[in-house]
Amino acid sequence: MKILVIGSGGREHALCWKLAQSPKTSTLYAAPGNPGISEVATCFDTTDFLGVAESVDADLTVVGPEAPLAAGIVDQFRSRGRLIVGPTAAAARLEASKAFAKGFMTRAGIPTAGFHSVNSTEQARATLDQFEFPVVLKADGLAAGKGVIIAASRAEAEQGIDQLLTPGASLIMEEFLVGEEVSFIVLSDGTNILALEPTQDHKALFDGDEGPNTGGMGAYCDGRILGEFQKEMVMAQVIRPAIEQMRDEGCPFTGFLYAGLMMTANGPKVLEFNARLGDPETQALMHRMKSDFVESLLAAAQGALDETALAWREDPSVCVVLAAAGYPGSVRTGDMITGIDRVMNATVFQAGTKLIENALKTSGGRVLGVTASGETLAAAIDHVYCEAAKIYFDGMHYRRDIGQKGLKRW
């Protein structure tokens, strides 16, 4: 099979790394790709994704990032009779519009935080009186995982309102939920559902979940994150109702549905829905997946997910993101990256990188995702940090506590 992967980040590098291992993959392509992806796939530096698919006659296309999904790439490909994994633009509204998603959860009876949607600064400030602090503020629309502010006081909330609420847009104001966050991702063909292993993302910039939210500073995948009863509770209360409601509303959800959950004392509650694989969750997932992923992706595109299953290695996996100077704010680029060739006991997935005169340099906020496995979670953590320490670029920073929350389950 000729497979095309859309995207240029660490998530897409991990996908390509995994798909390249399949005997079913004859040729692998990526658009636009990155220097790491180019080691396993032929890259096309373009955003004319349909043009690439038709020029190479791709048998299957897999979409990584959310922006092309929201823009209707799946609708476009299907109109030309091309197999593609991802939701239509209508279904991708679950991520593209937080206001739509909250209304959808209400219609489907999916547990989530109490909320109000506002569209003016005056309305937002008045609505603050209905919340206790901290309060969660979310910009409507795509924000690359960074459009969320947790305000501990009214002063912080008013500042956050001014920062996130833009003219003509909406702002979601939510109650602050207490519990442990879990990323629960499934693959669906519109009817059938295939659950991936739960993962845990670390969005805050600094250790101990301090500092501003980022697109994700690391993640780990471990079979102990949720028990079987908890997994079934998530499927019964969140995933199945979401897939059924989307079908009932006339836009079946196909592709990856990502439920960002808070496991509260009263059960799972949805913090957000995403319409694609998570980043950096994908890096940890692909590192731990035992199955041939091509089989499942093809089945999803063909509406035959009931005929496939996924197997996982027992060893937990951990991904640590190495970020550029200034991230998640104004990022400095062009710093030389060294040491990747010294990494022996981990896989380095590239994201914000660029080859300039045969030298690998930084070109984005999240530069690399160092990913390792181990017989225990503690061993995986040791491996990943030992290997991350071999890499250097000026201004490099990363969290030192990825996966630590999971050690209590061992």
Image (spheres, grey):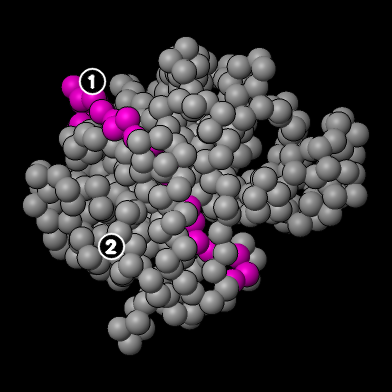
**Residue 197 place in picture, x, y as percent:** 39, 30
**Residue 107 place in picture, x, y as percent:** 58, 20
- Position of 36 with respect to 145 (left or right) is left
Residue visible at 67% across and 45% down in the picture: 208
Q: Which disc is residue 37 wearing?
A: 2
Q: Secondary structure at mark 1?
A: helix
Q: Quadrant of residue 38?
A: bottom left
Identify which residue, 296 or 79, lies in the foreground.
Answer: 296
Q: Is residue 112 above or below residue 346?
A: above
**Residue 380 place in picture, x, y as percent:** 41, 43
Q: Is residue 138 above or below residue 324?
A: above
**For mark 2, does the 10 Å Cα neighbourhood hold few (<14), some (14 to 19), or many (20 or more) residues?**
many
Q: Which residues are magenta?
A: 298-327
**For mark 1, does the 10 Å Cα neighbourhood hold few (<14), some (14 to 19), or many (20 or more) residues?**
some
Give amino acid for label 1. Asp
Q: Is residue 244 above or below residue 169?
A: above
- Position of 405 with respect to 308 (left or right) is right
- Residue 210 on the magenta span: no
Please say whether residue 249 is visible from this viewpoint: no
- Residue under numbered circle 1: 306
Residue visible at 30% across and 83% down in the picture: 358
Please say whether residue 194 is visible from this viewpoint: yes
Residue visible at 69% across and 54% down in the picture: 212
